Amino acid sequence: MYDINKFIANPSLVNHDVEGFLADLPHWSPRFAHQRAEEEGLTLTDAHWDVIVRLRELYRAEGPGWNARDVTRALEKDFAAAGGRRHLYALFPGGPLAQGCKLAGLPLPEGTLDPSFGSVH
């Protein structure tokens, strides 16, 4: 549920929902990702960009109805050689789905039980 007081207190949230996810997808840019990463205390590396690009590809293929379980499985498979889930959480300590989607300018996939954790079990 939206809390209008958060929007009034912080006008920078106007293009974002209350959790900080972009409300309007066309506004995303790599510069946006760098700014959000800095706010989250991350410095984006090529490994981060690989995940961000993959998340955007998955969203492009699946659309707004994408599923958290399928996205998690796809990411673990795609990055298995690099260490799978451990690698993803090392890159995105806030959760590969929650933090990764936030930086990629995407809404959380359906079925994400706890946005702060960023995955389903």
Image (cartoon, rainbow, N blue to C red):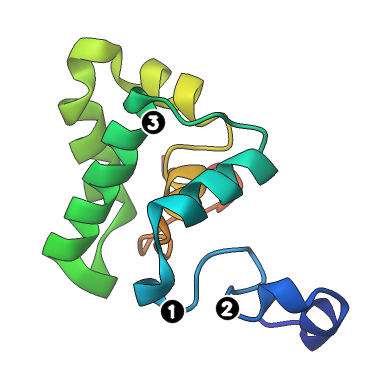
Q: Quadrant of residue 38?
A: top right
First in sequence, mark 1 or 3: give its number.
1
First in sequence, mark 1 or 2: give its number.
2
Q: According to the image, label 2 marks what residue?
A: 15
Q: How far apart are marks 1 and 3 (CA)?
A: 22 Å
Name the kind of residue labelled 1 in the image: Asp
Q: According to the image, label 3 marks what residue?
A: 48
Q: In which quarter of the image is residue 41?
A: top right
Label 1 SS: loop
- 112 sits to left or right of 115: left
Name the kind of residue labelled 3 in the image: His
In the rendered view, would you say 71 is above or below 16? above
In the rendered view, would you say 106 is above or below 8? above
- Residue 70 in the image: x percent, y percent? 22, 48
Q: How far apart are marks 2 and 3 (CA)?
A: 23 Å
Q: According to the image, label 1 marks what residue?
A: 24
- Residue 93 in the image: x percent, y percent? 56, 29
- 13 sits to left or right of 6: left
- Residue 44 in the image: x percent, y percent? 47, 31
- Name, please, the residue furthest toward the front: 31
Label 2 SS: loop
